[in-house]
Amino acid sequence: MEAEPPQEVIRKAIPVDEPMETPGLSTVLEDLPRTLPTEFRTVYTRCEVSEKVVALTFDDGPHAVFTPRLLDTLRDRDIKATFFMVGRNVKAYPHIVRRMVEEGHEVANHSWSHPLLTSLGNESLESQMRRTHDAIVAACGRVPILYRPPYGQVRMSQRKRIRDTFGYAAILWDVDPLDWQSPRQVKKVHDRVLSMSKTGSIILCHDIHETTVDAMPALLDEMKQQGFKFVTVSQLIQYEAQHLPATAAAAAATEEIQVKPSPELPVDAAPVAPDTIGTEAVSPGQP
Ligand code: NI
């Protein structure tokens, strides 16, 4: 009768079931894309991806105090986010925009003064986007490739115009914790993001609200524990484009977006650049 092999040998013989990182995601994570894929969609609310990755986005900043605090939180957890910024705040706080880029975040366009784009003519529309585009480039040297229309509202003809003029994709969201509606309710922001986020989600938050920034440390720790990985929006788009079969990509594209009408367009006490106080009546509202 043969002796059983020692336990040690058996253990070595069994192939180790190591978690495998798909080559795709690691490639995507290497660097921030400087361009969109050739066949990018005009609008994204989320992306079709196979791994548990999400894009965390912050609108309406930078804010002089809350944004640096948020950047600390992200840096401590090695999480990259995407910032859709209001141009006049970019002009007021260019050093914060530079820090975003230095720390690997994506910077993107959210108009100059947060107007409802659907109310604008072509010249005003282009001016809103151009001034912000130029302010971002001047602040950090990075050319934005994405925008988010204020309130998520933009006409189809305007989307085409912006795509043709700036090469931008429009980025909406599928996770909205309504953080601007819930002042002083850290738990609501936390619970909503956690319950709604899924593979490929684009999460909408605002770095001009202290509540939102305060919710992040615990929320992000919990999401990481649940296996979520965080990428920037253009990384998510690139990941979808590289690894999604063409048919699925086409299906995703036909998902084209029912933008929820904004029932209210709140105006809040967002930071206003000193040089624009009194000259522009519109405050950044939400989203
Ligand atoms: Ni906004």
Image (cartoon, rainbow, N blue to C red):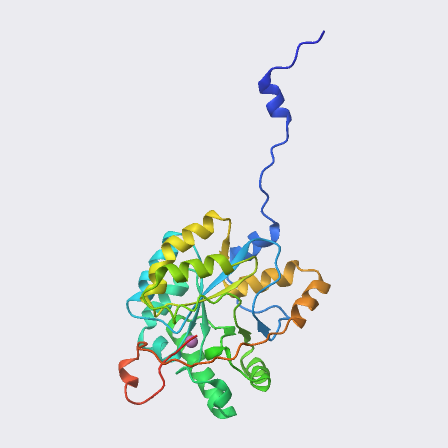
- Horizontally, residue 142 falls left or right of residue 276, namely right
Residue 212, by quadrant, is: bottom left
Q: Identify the image quadrant of the N terminus.
A: top right
Task: Count the numbered circles shown.
Answer: 0
> In the depicted view, which residue is nearer to us: 196 or 242?
196
Residue 258, x across and y down, in percent: 59, 76
Q: Position of residue 271 (x, y in %)?
A: 30, 76
Residue lying at 40% horizontally and 52% vertically, measured from the top left: 77
* Residue 61 seen in the current view: yes
> Is 158 drawn above or below residue 218 in the view shown?
below
Depth order, front residue of 134/242:
242
Front residue of 142/236: it is 236
Q: Is residue 75 left or right of residue 129?
A: left
Rendered-image quarter of ligand 1: bottom left
Q: Residue at x 52, y 69 (%)?
A: 173
Q: Quadrant of the C terminus?
A: bottom left
Residue 250, position in %: x, y? 70, 68
Farthest residue, direction top: 1
Residue 103 in sight in this render: no
- Left or right of residue 43, residue 94 in this image: left
Establish if 8 lies above or below 141. Answer: above
The image shows residue 246 at horizontal and vertical percentages of 71, 64
